[in-house]
Image (tube, coloured by chain):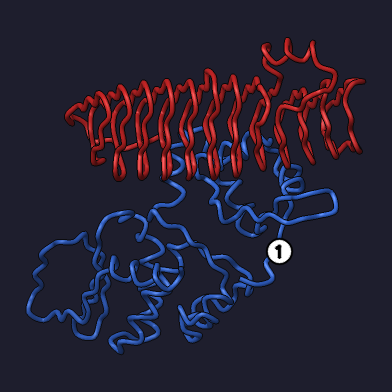
Chain colours: A blue, B red
Amino acid sequence: MSERELISKKELLELTGISYGQLYRWKRKQLIPEEWFIRKSTFTGQETFFPKELILPRIDKIVNMKDDLSLDELADKLSPFLFDHPLRKDELGKRNIVSKVVLDRFCGSDPDNTVYAFEQILAYYAVDQMLQSGAMSLEEGELLLMMLKEHGAKFEGRACELLFIRKMGVPVFALAASPSELIFENGAKVVAKVSLTDYMEQLKLKLT
Amino acid sequence: MTMAIPANNGNMRLVGETTMNGGTFGRITIIGESKLNGATECESFSCTGNSEVDGDLTAGKLKVIGELEIAGDLKARSVSVTGETRVKGGAQGDLLNVRGGEFAVGADCEFEEIKVYGAIRAGGLLSADRMELRLFGGSLASEIGGGHILIKMSKKLAIKKLFSLHDFGTIKVGTIEGDTIELEHTAADVVRGNRVTIGPGCEIGRVEYRGELKVSAKAKVGSQARVE
């Protein structure tokens, strides 16, 4: 990842008002991933830097949630898929994870350096895959994206299937915990039935 | 810390000179000299004598009197060791208590609380919320970080020092960062903290502090700066 804006540990503590002790405690509890600690030599000795766009929202989240949850619970919350790999928008396009068509259409207004969480990337990825299969139109993609954004988190950590049904040309999307058996009336046509869990696995491979 | 150790496993007792395969156990008791091949998980691991784990060791409770060598990582809720412990990988857990001897970790050593009477060596970061090191000398860490950090010379070494002319350092560290830092006989490149006390026998390259700084007349500090 190139040209990421870095923030030094000193500036971070000053900006967020947290202490060294807290920072090291959160690191021990793996609330802050090891990869975010970037060591560099400066004229005052070695210093640690963090990717600014990743660390600031993370610290914000921890500070806001730590009163209600224990640190261990928090550790589970922060990486719901046991995997957290936020990525910048321009990286998504450059690495061909999500096609340009989808990016332009659904998040054209976000600046290039917007960072998306894994769940968000997954939503875009699912839309992209469905579009490429030819079963779904761009307008319908919008519906799918809205649903994934709204309800995707409900299946956190569970196997889940995405259903695309059409009846008399009217598109309907559904998320179902798998394995589940669904039977539809005769007029309804199941256009696509894909496993979101598979998408998740594919995406993980592409991101790392 | 959270650890998943399957319950209701058989206990293992090794007496004399033995070699066993690793696996999942309830209690492991070793008296004598033993080698465990492969990753080992257990509720408690107690060893009097020498033992070697050729893989990762995950234990609820780890108690060693004598020598222990771990080829992989160590994960344990509470660790209490007297003697020599060498961990090639990293060490993680809640409480580390070194009652005497040396505790050496190849990578990072991260516990909620660390108490050491003896020596500690960490190839990477040594990190704890509360850290109390009373050292004989020969200790080493590339970084120390945490809430409260206290480093002193052990009483035994203090008596030895009475009869010798030169001052011995007890620990060499690259960077020390913490909220409250109290150091004696410590050599470090950089110390950063909120409240910092640099005691006698310290050699510090640079001190950066936020709240207050006390420097002993018997300490050497290259440069100091208050950070707002």
Residue designated by label 1:
A5
Residue B145 placed where, x, y %?
65, 36
For this rendering, which residue is in front, A108 or B191?
B191
Name the residue rendered at 23%, 72% in the picture. A163
Name the residue rendered at 60%, 57% in the picture. A54
For this rendering, which residue is in front, A189 or B52?
B52
B154 relative to B51, above or below: above
Whether residue B228 can be seen here: no
A172 relative to B35, above or below: below
Q: Dot 1: within a 10 Å radius of its alpha carbon, few (fewer than 14), some, or many (20 or more) residues?
A: few
Which quarter of the picture shows residue B76? top left
Which quarter of the picture shows residue B11? top left
Q: Relative to residue A168, is residue B86 drawn left or right?
A: right
Which quarter of the picture shows residue B64? top left
For this rendering, which residue is in front, A89 or B110?
B110
For this rendering, which residue is in front, B186 or A146?
B186
- Quadrant where the N terminus of chain A lies? bottom right
Residue B7 placed where, x, y %?
21, 31
Q: Secondary structure at mark 1?
A: loop
Q: Relative to residue B150, is residue A173 drawn left or right?
A: left
Q: Relative to residue B93, is residue A185 drawn left or right?
A: left
Name the residue rendered at 44%, 52% in the picture. A79
Residue A190 placed where, x, y %?
17, 79
A146 relative to B190, above or below: below
Q: Name the subunit of mark 1.
A: A
